[in-house]
Amino acid sequence: MNSTEFSVDRRDIRFVQQELLQLAKLTELPRFKDFTPEDFDMIVEEGSTFVEEVFAPLNKSGDEIGARLDNGKVTTPPGFKEAWRQTAEAGWVGITSDPAFGGQGLPISVAVGVLESMYGANASLYTTAMLTAGSAGLITAFGDQAQKELYARRMIGGQWGGTMCISEPEAGSAVGDITTSAVKASDGPHYLIRGTKCWITGGDHDFTDNNIHLVLARVEGAPPGPKGISLFIVPKFRVDPQGHCVDSNDVTTVRLEHKLGIKASPTAVLEFGAAGDCHGYLLEGENLGMAQMFKLMNEARLQISYQGLGSASGAYRNALAYARERIQGISIERGKDRAAERTPIVRHPDVLHMLMTMKATTEGARALIYATAYYSDMARHGPDDTRQHFKDLVDILTPVAKNTGADQCHEAVRLGVQVLGGVGYTEEFPLAQALRDSKIASIYEGTSGIQALDLVTRKLRMRGGGLFQTLLREIGDLAQNQALLPQLGQAIAEWRDATDKLELTVASLANLAEELGPREGVLNASDVTVYFGDVMCAYYLLKMALIAETRLVEMGAGNSAASNAEGSGLDEQSARETARNSEEARFFYNKIKTAEHYVFQILPRAKAIAAKVQSRNFAALEAMMEEVG
Amino acid sequence: MNIIVLVKSVIDVELNIRVKDGEVVKDGLNYILSKWDENALEAALQLKEAGDGEVTAVTVGPDRAGEALRKALAMGADKGVHVNDPAAAGSDAFGIAKILAKVIQRNAFDLVIAGRQSQDTDLGATGPVLAELLGVPLAVNVIEIDPKPAGGKLNIKRKGDVGVELIEIALPALLTANDSLNEPRLASLRGIMAARKKPMDILTLSDLGIDPETVGAAGSGIEIVEFQPPPQRAAGQKFEGEPEEIARQVVELLANEAKIFA
Ligand SMILES: Cc1cc2nc3c(=O)[nH]c(=O)nc-3n(C[C@H](O)[C@H](O)[C@H](O)COP(=O)(O)OP(=O)(O)OC[C@H]3O[C@@H](n4cnc5c(N)ncnc54)[C@H](O)[C@@H]3O)c2cc1C
């Protein structure tokens, strides 16, 4: 771990996967019975090494050089194509994809242990892999056998790329407004596609011979709005049944965007059917497009949360390493003693506060995101009678996890820049790029504002608030736990209080909507999503702190005051002593401190959010902002 | 070609290792495949890929040594043999070599490749002792292997004290790998998945017909009575000022204190 290179937080990932979520138990499910817990560990370990050795070294040059479009041909930065080949050959593209078509079929809660690092180490490179696997997933879920064999298998293997073509110049957040058209051909089973798609990640690149676009379009005569949208497979090159590229398919790369970050990820404007000869192959049936997208939407959105997480994790480790090395100033307790030794900045309380906030944010987000991934595995592959329960948890937590990963983690990266001071603002250290790169997570796959609306106007209202009640019951277990350390007990009580108030705040929002109207009801939707995320992150951090207490006791920590009493518990002094002597114990001790910091230094913003909602002030709605002048 | 690779699970020295009461504190330690063994394995895989044959990875150790073996399988070895017997614990190099010899002699083999030393003990004795027990020629510290054996011989280069030796070695033989021999491949996800279905033999000493008294701590000729951590490195020295001035100071110190020009 150092201040300039990306490194994976193996220890924390292991803790979340093995000790908090106990993913070993997934191997008892029929779907994962061919795996052993050791396989999971090894995959995460080896994947981490792969990321550090193959992804990370290309991140900076990728940013400097960027993807380019010259004479209609896209070139990615040097090394990217080779890295793609290695990633594909090693099987990482299809890590969670269907094994029937060449995927590795891993639980997503295991895979995320590698994927967050792929994002953190080189988001640009990973975006194309993620979209390729994601679009292949639509084909394996809804395609016919021939489509799965011809397209999905090659995409999962990384021989061909894949994209999701949803956005259009006039239809971004409002997906239902797309206008790209599809007309049934008179001379074959295909449709003729015509329209412009923009912002297409991996829309064109030099990694593969072919690129398979999954395009949302409207069949002639379809009903207006979301109900009239269909999904098509549109290859860049038409292929014969053996998969040879035989003909260009009238898909033109018009432009690549010049972006704030992920510069090596080609974001393309694509023109379909400029010459009237773009073939699209319908997936499943007409007008099913939105329903199909919805089925895979939770997973796609959760994927984006990994990006912020990976960036924050890398940034925290860089910032911590830097703070331990950088000498500046005198410790405040030495007062004005000019002769005092200069101190590493890691001793300054403000720097510690920033580092701890980064750590708590990152580790809270990691637990929330991995847990949501675990619920998702259980919703799809768990025992039949529990699936609905887990599906409810996934539905309600997905927008929360996405915004936490995107926004809170981005904030943690910002703090990382701050910890470094001047050099943090330069490209000499990776924080500046991480800050730019990670910003995108709050924009694509539904902006944070759209996630907040999804939470407040859909998920919290589903089944008369039933999903929310399920979640509250699920996290209610924490209040039953007895902490050994008094301050951890207080933290749990504080969390309990914040959770109760979340319930009230959610109810207040519903009241506002009912009494005053829908606009008032969503004014603080984003804030409440933050509140929700804070409660969830604190929940998992506290659970981890309780585990950490037990581990410390197992490692010999006890209660120095009552050393003779049987099963004497744990006190701060003894915990510290144990931690001083062992790196492992220090990990656990700091885990407890992380939970405390989150509850007492971050979670209090929930009170401010509750106050905003209670204020019933709608100045933002009342001000005449729409008027010109 | 039938190639045997010897692998060992060792403590990952990237982590801080602490010594307490004369013993390494085991909590929180991470175990990895000893790095020279990765070179040995890579060499075996390259030989196999250049011609044909089979690569068998062999380890002696407790349960966790199975991890090193599985890593070897994930990297591409075809089979694994794990001698897992508490009575083998505490073996010296001779004891380990005795066990390995029994494993290897169960079948015909063309080549045994080991790391030139293991990353934890830095002993470098197991390979040579094993060659002796197997009665095969030995080349240690190998830095290059011509992947095409000719006339039952293999052309290799090894690094000696003063230069590089070009050697023709008759098979079957035993080689130990220098870390410049190759760049070991990463275990791929596909490799890890494939490894789950590869055969792994788990053997005890009695399966191999070995008297437990002759190996392990009982049969060991040496005993580690205490473990002392390496001495702390003295603090470095920082130079400040103009580059020319710093250069002058450094040269002076190197000449007068370190006496490197003497
Ligand atoms: C780098 C990059 C890669 C991308 N990759 C892809 C891709 O691969 N495939 C693809 O199809 N698209 C992709 N997108 C598009 C992305 O999904 C859209 O940019 C995003 O959905 C927002 O749409 P928009 O840009 O049109 O913004 P708008 O929809 O115009 O939104 C502008 C602002 O208004 C807010 N807003 C809009 N509608 C509402 C509403 N109803 N209520 C409240 N607030 C609202 C938004 O939150 C946002 O703050 C990508 C975008 C970028 C920048």
Image (cartoon, grey):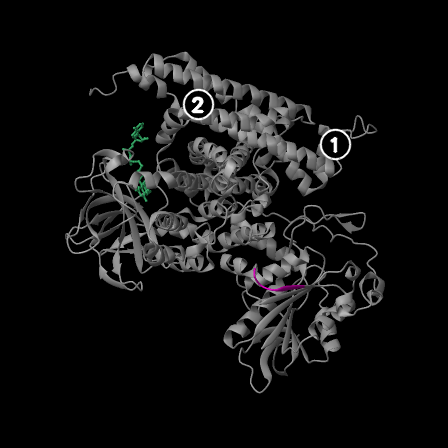
The quadrant of the image that shows the C terminus of chain B is bottom right
Dominant secondary structure of the residues highlighted in magenta in the image = loop
In-image side of A102 versus B66 (left or right): left
Q: Where is residue A481 in the image (x, y as percent from the top left)?
A: 65, 27
The three-letter code of the residue at mark 2 reads Gly
**Label 2 crowding class (10 Å Cα cut-off): few <14, some 14-19, many 20+?**
some
Q: State which image quarter holds ligand 1.
A: top left
What's the mark number on residue A465?
A: 2
- Residue A228 among those drawn in magenta: no
Boundaries of the magenta span = B197-201
- Chain under disc 1: A
Asked if the residue under mark 1 is in contact with the one under mark 2, i.e. CB atoms within 8 Å, the reply is: no
- Chain under disc 2: A
In-image side of A507 versus A49 (left or right): left
Q: Tell me the element at label 2.
A: helix
Q: Is residue A261 visible?
A: yes
Q: Where is residue B205 in the image (x, y as percent from the top left)?
A: 77, 65
Q: Position of residue A192 (x, y in %)?
A: 18, 50
Q: Is residue A607 visible?
A: no
Q: Position of residue A287 (x, y in %)?
A: 26, 40
Number of disc labels? 2
The residue lying at 52 percent from left, 43 percent from top is A318
The residue lying at 40 percent from left, 55 percent from top is A156
In-image side of A532 versus A152 (left or right): right
Q: Is residue A6 above or below residue A615?
A: below
Can you tell which quarter of the image residue A240 is in? Answer: bottom left
The quadrant of the image that shows the N terminus of chain B is bottom right
What's the mark number on residue A618?
A: none
What's the mark number on residue A574?
A: 1
Q: Tell me the element at label 1.
A: helix
